[in-house]
Amino acid sequence: MDRDAFFAAALRNPVNEAIVDELFRLALPDAWLVSGCLVQTVWNVLTGRAINHGINDYDVFYFDSDTSWRAENKVIRQLAKRLARLGARVEVRNQARVHLWYPEKHGLPYPALTCSADGIDRFLTKTTQVGLRRHHSGHDVHAPNGFSDIAGMIVRPNPGPNFSAASYAAKATRWKTAWPELTILSADGTD
């Protein structure tokens, strides 16, 4: 699978496409649709399942230097109102402020980020380190590990400063239930 095949499969989900288009219209700074909703859509295409099978939510990252909760909450409410017609749960996070709440919530360090792609790169699995956004002349895809694990339905851990083996195991178990074809690598990256 290459970038174009990933892009085409991910946008077969009309919710993904609508969110990407809405982010473009809103012109949020450094805004991306990210992670599971993209990868899981591709898995559904590959396995012939309903396009939204197993997708719990749709994650949006943006990066704004206003790190107040008030500013982020305003964006969350604005997107919720504009996307309500989709009937999907959309999770919106300003990546410029994650380091302010993550350590207390998860008990793990989280160094400050410099852009949304930094947040994508810290995902729990390398498989879900993907983001998609629209711009005036097309789309960008951020995928630091490429697409082979996505196409091969391999879930690979992303060890790093905020990795949790317990969280990885819980996520992998849920995914394996929804997509039994998955190959789940152990938290140390082996079979």
Image (spheres, rainbow, N blue to C red):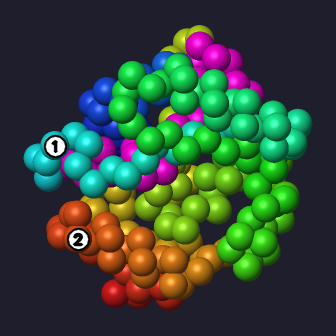
Q: Which residue is mark 2?
A: 177
Q: Separation of disc 1 and disc 2 at Cα? A: 15 Å
* Magenta stretch secondary structure, dominant: helix
Residue at 33% x, 50% y is: 55
Q: Which residues are magenta?
A: 23-46
Point out residue 107 in the picture as x, y percentages from the top left corner: 73, 79
Q: Amino acid at mark 2?
A: Thr
Which is nearer the eye, 107 or 159? 107
Q: Is residue 38 rendered magenta in the image? A: yes
For the residue labelled by badge 1, is the local secondary structure a helix, a strand or a loop?
loop
In this view, which residue lies farthest toward the left? 48
Which residue is depicted at the point 34% across and 56% down?
150
Q: What amino acid is found at the position of numbered circle 1 in the picture? A: Ala
Does 184 appear above or below 143?
A: below
Q: Is the C terminus in the top left, top right, bottom left or bottom right quadrant?
A: bottom left
Q: Earlier in the sequence, mark 1 or mark 2?
A: 1
Residue drawn at x 41%, y 71% as measured from the top left = 171
Q: Mark 1 highlights which residue?
A: 50
Q: Position of residue 184 (x, y in %)?
A: 33, 77
Residue 74 falls in image quadrant: top right
Residue at figure coordinates x 47%, y 57% from the top left: 128
Q: Position of residue 41 (x, y in %)?
A: 30, 44
Front position in the image: 27 or 8: 27
| Label 2 environment density (alpha carbons within 10 Å; few <14, some 14–19, many ≥20) | few
The magenta stretch spans residue 185: no
User: Residue 46 placed where, x, y %?
Assistant: 18, 49
